[in-house]
């Protein structure tokens, strides 16, 4: 099959590209960075250099594809752009995808959404996934769409490295002994590859998770891996977290959205639909990620 992938060589798109090329598919990878072209070609794929903000470029890149994999991304630097309307920018990308899919004539789409996309209430920053899912649902009925809804990414835990180094704790506004689902990008890539090769008509939702584990268990597992067996996960107030992120220079809209998202993790409301459609767990467990975390932790410099 001819498959076009967005996301450049990110955490999901790179292993996805590798798997699809290995299986003999003809893969085109979209990247905004011309320097990525050689790396993409080294994987056996074709590079299409352009941006998600350009609907005409996307339409040309999608044309002739049997399947397109789409995901919205602005980059971590955008979190600190004080003038950015985050939700507006993501909605624009979603509308560009819709336009490009319709103009190109593609009939099979796999979209990276998220846990929490089942609602636009009380899920904080994840509400943009609900919005984009509904934008894509405006496509004609003959366009089949699989909405992939992964849960919290393991690699978000890297955000706690500096706090562990400086304060000896993990601190945020959720925690405790309740088990929550987490996922590796490798398991997401595998699930997407499965869906791409699966005959399907209509609209489908698939959740993706690798492990279900509590915050206190995460602290114990990461602590053991980095040589800090007494590492604790501490719950701080919403106000403390919000003030800390804004003081660090984060866009206030994004900071408030992250705080609200974390509240929905603490109450469990974020995972209500996940547990109604609970998937078979993937291969990469927290113990596997903890080894990678230890390498990053010991090689990082204290901020």
Image (spheres, grey):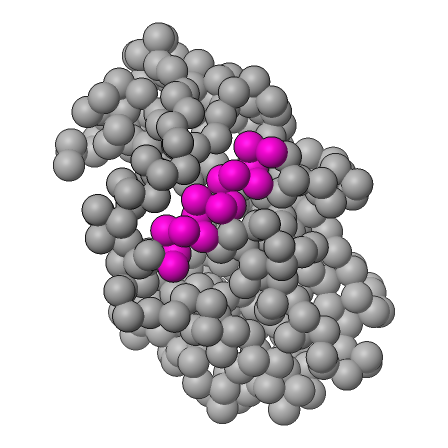
Position of residue 162 measured from the top left corner of the image (x, y, whole percent): 24, 32
Q: What's the magenta region?
A: 253-267
Question: How many numbered circles are shown?
Answer: 0
Q: Quadrant of the N terminus?
A: bottom right
Residue 92 at least partly seen: yes
Q: Is 292 placed above or below 192 here? A: above
Would residue 265 be found to the left or right of residue 74 on screen?
right
Would residue 281 be found to the left or right of residue 14 on screen?
right
- Nearest the viewer among 28 and 96 is 96
Would residue 108 be found to the left or right of residue 53 on screen?
right
**Magenta span dominant secondary structure:** helix
- Nearest the viewer among 99 and 13 is 99
Examine the image and state in which quarter residue 47 appears: bottom left
Furthest-front residue in view?
239
Residue at horizontal 73 percent and vertical 45 percent from the top: 273
Residue 19 at least partly seen: no
Position of residue 126 measured from the top left corner of the image (x, y, whole percent): 54, 54
Position of residue 130 measured from the top left corner of the image (x, y, whole percent): 63, 62
Let me know if residue 149 is in the magenta part.
no
Q: Is 142 placed above or below 183 here? A: below
Q: Quadrant of the C terminus?
A: top left
Residue at horizontal 62 percent and vertical 50 percent from the top: 116
Q: Is 68 placed above or below 113 here? A: below
- Nearest the viewer among 17 and 228 is 228
Examine the image and state in which quarter residue 102 appears: bottom right
Position of residue 236 measured from the top left corner of the image (x, y, whole percent): 38, 28
Residue at horizontal 44 percent and vertical 44 percent from the top: 259
């Amino acid at each position: 099959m001819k498959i076009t992938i967005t996301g450049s060589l990110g955490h999901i798109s790179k292993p996805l590209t590798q798997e699809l090329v290995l299986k003999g598919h003809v893969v085109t990878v979209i990247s905004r960075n011309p320097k990525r072209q050689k790396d993409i070609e080294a994987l056996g794929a074709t590079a299409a250099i352009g941006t998600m903000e350009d609907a005409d470029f996307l339409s040309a890149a999608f044309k002739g594809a049997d399947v397109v994999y789409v995901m919205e991304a602005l980059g971590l630097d955008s979190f600190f752009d004080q003038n950015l309307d985050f939700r507006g920018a993501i909605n624009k990308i979603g509308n560009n995808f819709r336009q490009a899919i319709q103009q190109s004539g593609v009939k099979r789409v796999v979209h990276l959404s998220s846990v929490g996309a089942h609602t636009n209430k009380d899920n904080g920053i994840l509400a943009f996934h609900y919005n984009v899912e509904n934008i894509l649902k405006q496509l004609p009925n003959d366009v089949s769409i699989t909405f992939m809804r992964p849960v919290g990414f393991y690699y978000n835990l890297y955000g706690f490295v500096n706090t562990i180094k400086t304060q000896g704790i993990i601190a945020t506004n959720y925690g405790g002994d309740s088990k929550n689902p987490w996922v590796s990008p490798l398991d997401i890539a595998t699930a997407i590859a499965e869906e791409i090769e699966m005959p399907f008509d209509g609209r489908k939702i698939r959740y993706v998770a690798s492990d279900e584990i509590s915050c206190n268990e995460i602290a114990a597992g990461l602590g053991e891996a980095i040589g800090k067996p007494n590492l604790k996960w501490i719950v701080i107030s919403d106000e403390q977290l919000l003030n800390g992120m804004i003081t660090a220079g984060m866009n206030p809209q994004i900071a408030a959205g992250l705080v609200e998202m974390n509240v929905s993790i603490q109450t469990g409301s974020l995972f209500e639909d996940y547990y109604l459609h609970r998937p078979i767990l993937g291969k990469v467990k927290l113990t596997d990620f903890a080894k990678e975390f230890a390498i990053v932790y010991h090689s990082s410099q204290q901020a």
